[in-house]
Image (tube, grey):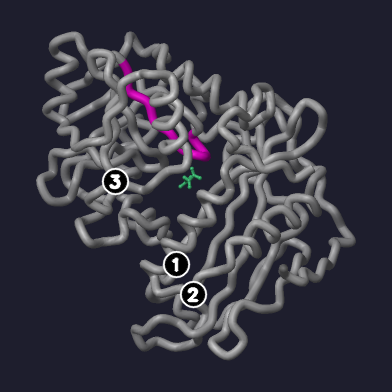
Amino acid sequence: MLDIKIEKTTSPKVKPDYTKLGFGKYFTDHMFLMNYSTEKGWHDARIVPYGPLALDPSAMVFHYAQELFEGLKAYRRKDGGIQLFRPDRNIERMNNTCDRLCVPRLDPADVLQAIKTVVEVDADWVPYDEGTSLYIRPFIFATDPMLGVHPSHTYIFCIILSPVGSYYAAGINPVKICIEREYVRCVKGGTGIAKAGGNYAASLIGQQKAEKLGFAQVLWLDGVHRKYIDEVGAMNVFFVIDGVVITPELTDGNILPGVTRASCIELLKKWGIPVEERKLSIDEVKEAHANGKLDEVFGTGTAAVISPVGELYDEGETLIVNNNEIGAIAHKLYDAITGMQWGRLEDEMGWIEKIN
Ligand code: COI
């Protein structure tokens, strides 16, 4: 159990308009911090007013990107209470990312306590409006002031909070996605499976290209064969072909093991809807589309929730999916998952962790 010191702000911020939140633009009054050193381990857990951090310009994170993050949300129930969705999964994935990036692991119970405590301190920032939540961004970065390329001996673990609406400007309406043929997001043996900030830095060039062409995100293909579907920039991806739900398998280590992804697979299995985790090539997707068998495409993620894809663009060719409308399976998953998250439906899977 952590001994978390709490220093409250003396100048609380004015809250934003909760009907126009967008994603990740506003931050709450407080943040959680904890330090690591080889001698002391993780220590000095504290909640302080949200604000800039002072770091040595030589801090390793600035040079070699030894940084990782997580993303989860706190949801406001109708009765005013606040709850989390499967935080244990995010914490487990954070520790797996720590292993990949040579960062010392944290005690999962300490991380959960830190998340719950900082959310409680800023509880009045958890929005009430339909479709809104408090996005929780835990992250860890290397702080050794030194330029040798080695794992750092010191780190900071920080948690910041941001009231959010939908990730995409389109909301639950289908998004347009562009297939990337030139760049890849990751390679076998790389860090694709980990939630490393560097993965997202490497993806920005594709994202920038896609945005210039008017698309919301990039669909990444595998780095070896350049033909199997990996994932979309900020979400995992599912295809429904002839009634079977297919999502790329995790086994090559290049797909982020999304919490929403796992939850969708578990729900589909429970409902008896056929679901396969396997390699899926872009050619198979195009063939299914040509034969009228590409029923649905949708992305899943904490930020994106369930986001239908209405249009796939690849080198001059546009595939319109399901008439640019949300499909039945994406809709069913959306209703079930958001129903549990906001407490409108019974937590029959045991996925909810109440804060109060
Ligand atoms: C999330 O869904 O929480 C993510 O981390 C995606 C993010 C890069 C916006």
Where residue 110 appears, as percent x and y from the top left, is 65, 64
Kind of residue indicated by mark 1:
Cys
The residue beneath circle 2 is 104
Kind of residue indicated by mark 2:
Pro
Residue located 20% across and 57% down the image: 188
The residue beneath circle 3 is 250
The residue beneath circle 1 is 98
Secondary structure, magenta segment, majority class: strand
Give the magenta range.
Answer: 296-304
Residue located 27% across and 25% down the image: 312
- Is residue 298 magenta-colored? yes
Which of 113/189 is in front? 113
> Are the residues at dot 1 and dot 3 in contact (C-beta closer than 8 Å)?
no
The C terminus: image quadrant:
top right
Asked which quadrant contains residue 80, the reply is top right
Q: Looking at the image, is mark 1 or mark 3 earlier in the sequence?
A: 1
